[in-house]
Image (cartoon, grey):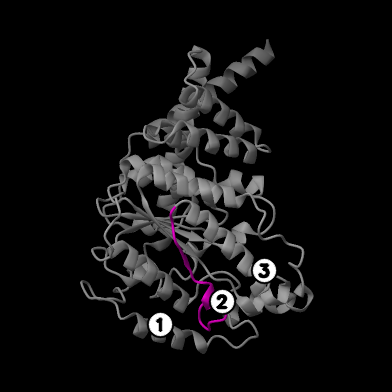
Amino acid sequence: MKRLAAFCLALVLFLGISTGIRSFADGRNLRDPKGDFQYWYNPYKDRCVQALTDNLGKKTMLVFGSSELGHQKKSRFYIKNMFHRSDLDVMNIGQPYSQDLNHATMLAALAPSMHTRKAVLLLSPNWFFGEDVKPDLFSIRFSDSAYVGMLQNPTLSRGLKKAISKRTRYLLRDDRAKQKRVEAYDARYLRHTRNPLKRAEAGYYRSHTRSQERAALIMAEKVDNMKTQNRPKNPRPMVPKGQAPDWEHLQQIALERTLIHSNNPLQISDRMWKKKFARIYRRSKGLHLNTPVTISREYEDFDLFLRVCEEEGIDVQVILQPVSGFWYDHTGIDAARRNEYRKKISEVAMKNGVKVTDLSKYSYTPGMLTDAVHPWKKGWVILDEKIYNFYKAPALY
């Protein structure tokens, strides 16, 4: 009798909490009238499809990336601080460990709501180091609403949905709770089961996780607002409204502001050298000699992303970011080995009719990288230029 009473109490508490979360989150408008949401660097943003679609404007272009989107955010050269919104309207999507499959799924979910049929994919070479994505890291970035949105996209082919589903279930093999939800979503939205219990299960998971995503996002926004309310407002854009950027001049300014803070063997930020690399530099000699660079299944995920672009009529610019040639020469992935992954990435892109904007020539350029892989001030100017020019160019679709 006591066990039954405890079970009933737990059930009541669970239903009460679930109802509270839904009433707190589901009725709120997630649109940010100030437009700051588009550049907000937060994992809860990247998992909530409804928030992303609510903040897509008619001229908004998506920029997919990973941890580089969180570097140099206060710098005048960071993409948010370079342009007036009317000159460049983009939505950043990406966190550490966000990779091609996460982005393929999210793009498929957002595609029906996109007015501007353009997207940028910032490829990090280290996504392709090793044999495969680590399941625990993929699980961290998995989004239920993105996955369901992908399955419900009416113009995405069944074959591509099945390919994304198979790969997702494999990468969630160590997270049985999420894998179980994916199986339920597949039964209802991919195989269109008539089993009422299976349909109800998928509907419950979808509704519950949607509310969780929205509630987490709203709370994160509140916390972020409290942290930033006393900070100075964003600086004036580096490029005045309506003016064409002078990229050479901007690069020169950026370089001047980094050279005084870069006096180390890697030509990276002195702060990062002292914080991390100085203490590991000697013992890291040959560290990556046995790390494969051409066999990762990430190449298949990259192909899935490009297939989503093709089926959805989205013009995509793939930007292959540079890595520190000084660091990777030292650790065992030298220029010859880096050419191997560059070639394979290019082959996957060409197969899908896409050209890669390869920034590898900047691997030894001062002021380019703050550490082994992330953009510094000059690095951001060069990324800004590529993104800005793509945004201004006529769309293919």
- Which one is earlier in the sequence, the residue at label 1 or at label 2? 1
Q: Quadrant of residue 381?
A: bottom left
Instruction: Select label 1 or label 3 by which is in front.
Output: 3
Q: Would you place residue 264 above or below residue 222 in this image? A: below
Q: Amino acid at mark 3?
A: Arg
**Residue that numbered label 1 is attached to:** 251
Q: Residues within 10 Å of mark 3 (few under 14, many from 20)?
A: some
SS at badge 2: loop
- Left or right for 345, reference 391: right
Q: Main secondary structure of the magenta part?
A: loop
- Left or right for 99, reference 78: right
SS at badge 3: helix
Q: Amino acid at mark 1?
A: Gln
**Residue that numbered label 3 is attached to:** 337
Q: Which residues are magenta?
A: 353-369
Instruction: Select label 2 or label 3 by which is in front.
Output: 3
Instruction: Report how far apart the C-alphas of labels 1 and 3 lie in the structure.
Output: 29 Å
**Residue that numbered label 2 is attached to:** 363
Q: Amino acid at mark 2?
A: Ser
Q: Would you place residue 50 above or below residue 96 in this image? A: above
Q: Quadrant of residue 211?
A: top left
